């Protein structure tokens, strides 16, 4: 066998392929938990990454500032027009809020699905090969971030935490192809119309909201927020606006297309919503089918 | 000092890739184009050509492993692909002249190969469902263009650094 062994490279390649397949199979099995060496690597690399990313964010922020400065005049004109209606809305909102607190006092209900504790965080990297929509942020379990928490920007919901290590967390964006990504949502109208956000239409860049009862009167232009009934997300995070309503494949329930309120590119600062009310593993978590018995048909 | 410059640049490029991917996808005429930064791959090909192909494969293996653990959460994809591409590049470069322009062209070809491999793996593991036509127009072509720009801008510098290190090593430094 001397000739065979002289071809050392071929052996290395073959062994490499075998090890590769074994490793892929091993790590695909359980992707949402990091074992101790993985956590250590993530934290160390994440630390180095944030040393490089933060100056980069500073520079892009500077350029953005200059860019907005050039548009200031136009923007100011537009904003002035909106300011008048804003003052009236503000007064109304304060009144409504005060009223709400008073009424809550009367019925003696302290807990609120809407209440959450925000954790501010910086995006340090995005998965460079972009087969999956993932970003990594610089807060982890030591800051109180946990798997399945909602992640949002000032504009609206962008995704949820799928993996957290002591000092970093991986966030899957809502614009993912992953069909297991569900968010319990509702359309705000005269009544509360509940449904589930599941799926994203890549070509039009819109979210798909399914399982809306056919008796609901969903119209174009209505706002969609998280319902808080999924167990982990707080209530009232803005998701987007209905652009189109149709029926699903079987004609039993309605289906709405939603234009997301947040943009998914050039993310820098995000907020993680840590709900103050009890958390249960429902639709927002991974094992919704078992927990709620909701039927995949 | 120059001893550490080669791995330092590799690590810097490793950290720069995810920052550039924050700008992607780019929207032109309401079409989304994904550009994948492959800076590290380009640099490794230059190391393989002008310095030492074995070193390039080792760097590819280590950084590929970190890439997998940090970004992908599937160990084995880039750990395998980076060294493989370095190896193929080293094989090819043995047959042709080591002119800067030919190495630049080779880098673009290798990036295309890497993208095709990564598309193959992503469809096998079911990370993506896009068909080949869409992959070609919305991902492969923009990636090629973006990385060609990078190669044209930094290729000559990479050549200078790696070649300098090679001559130093030959002089027994």
Image (spheres, coloured by chain):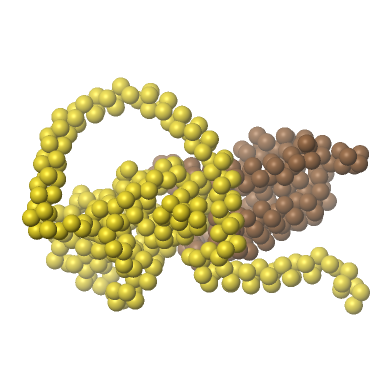
Chain colours: A yellow, B brown
With respect to residue A276, does A50 lie above or below? above
Which quadrant: the N terminus of chain A?
bottom right
Q: Report x, y in % for residue A243.
A: 25, 52
Side of A279 relative to B114 (left or right): left
Q: Is residue B145 rendered to the left or right of residue B168?
A: left
Snapshot quadrant of residue A288? bottom left
**Residue B51: in sight, yes or no?**
yes
- Image quadrant assignment for residue B160: top right
Residue A96 coordinates in the image, percent (x, y) = 11, 45
Q: Residue at x 50, y 45 (%)?
A: A124
Asked if residue A152 can be seen in this view, the reply is: no
Q: Quadrant of the C terminus of chain A?
A: bottom left
In the image, is residue A248 above or below residue B59? below
Residue visible at 46% across and 54% down in the picture: A142
Q: How many marks?
A: 0
Q: How far across and down, in percent of the image, does residue A214 sit?
A: 17, 67
In the rendering, at what x and y percent does residue B14 appear? 62, 47
Say above or below: B35 vs A210.
above
Residue drawn at 32 percent across, 51 percent down: A117
Q: Residue at x 42, y 61 (%)?
A: A147
**Observer-nearest of B37 and A80:** A80
Residue B81 in the figure: left or right of residue A63 = right
């Amino acid at each position: 066998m001397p000739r065979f062994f002289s071809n050392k490279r071929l052996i290395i390649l073959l062994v490499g392929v075998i090890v590769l397949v074994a490793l892929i199979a091993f790590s695909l099995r359980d992707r949402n938990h990091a074992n101790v060496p993985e956590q250590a690597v993530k934290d160390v690399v994440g630390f180095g990454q944030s040393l490089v990313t933060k100056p980069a964010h500073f520079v892009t922020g500077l350029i953005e500032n200059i860019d907005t400065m050039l548009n200031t005049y136009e923007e100011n004109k537009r904003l002035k027009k909106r300011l008048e209606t804003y003052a009236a809305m503000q007064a109304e909102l304060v009144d409504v809020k005060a009223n709400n607190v008073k009424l809550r006092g009367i019925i003696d209900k302290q807990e609120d699905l809407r209440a959450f504790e925000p954790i501010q965080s910086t995006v340090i990297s995005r998965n460079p090969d972009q087969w999956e929509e993932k970003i990594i942020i610089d807060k982890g379990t030591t800051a109180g971030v946990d798997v399945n928490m909602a992640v949002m920007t000032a504009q609206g919901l962008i995704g949820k935490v799928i993996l957290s290590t002591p000092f970093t967390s991986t966030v899957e964006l809502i614009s993912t192809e992953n069909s297991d990504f569900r968010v319990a949502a509702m359309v705000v109208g005269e009544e509360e119309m509940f449904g589930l956000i599941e799926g994203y239409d890549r070509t039009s860049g819109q979210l798909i909201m399914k399982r809306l009862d056919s008796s609901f009167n969903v119209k174009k232009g209505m706002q969609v927020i998280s319902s808080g009934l999924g167990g982990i997300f707080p209530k009232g995070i803005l998701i987007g606006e209905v652009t189109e309503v149709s029926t699903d494949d079987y004609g039993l329930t309605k289906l709405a297309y939603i234009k997301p309120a947040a943009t998914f590119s050039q993310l820098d600062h995000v907020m993680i919503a840590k709900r103050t009310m009890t958390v249960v593993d429902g639709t927002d978590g991974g094992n919704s089918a078992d927990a709620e018995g909701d039927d995949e048909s | 000092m120059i001893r550490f410059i080669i791995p330092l640049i590799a690590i810097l490029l490793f950290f720069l890739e995810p920052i550039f991917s924050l700008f992607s996808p780019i929207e032109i005429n309401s079409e989304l184009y994904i550009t994948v930064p492959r800076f590290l791959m380009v640099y490794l090909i230059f190391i393989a050509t002008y310095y030492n192909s074995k070193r390039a494969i080792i760097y590819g293996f280590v950084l590929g492993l970190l890439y997998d653990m940090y970004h992908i959460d599937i160990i084995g994809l880039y750990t395998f692909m980076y060294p493989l591409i370095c190896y193929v590049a080293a094989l090819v470069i043995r047959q042709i002249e080591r002119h800067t322009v030919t190495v630049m062209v080779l880098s673009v070809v290798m990036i295309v190969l890497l993208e095709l491999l990564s598309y193959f793996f992503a469809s096998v593991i079911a990370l993506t469902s896009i068909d080949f036509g869409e992959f070609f127009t919305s991902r492969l072509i923009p990636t090629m263009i973006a990385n060609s720009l990078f190669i044209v801008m930094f290729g000559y510098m990479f050549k200078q650094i790696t070649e300098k290190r090679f001559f130093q090593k030959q002089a027994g430094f």
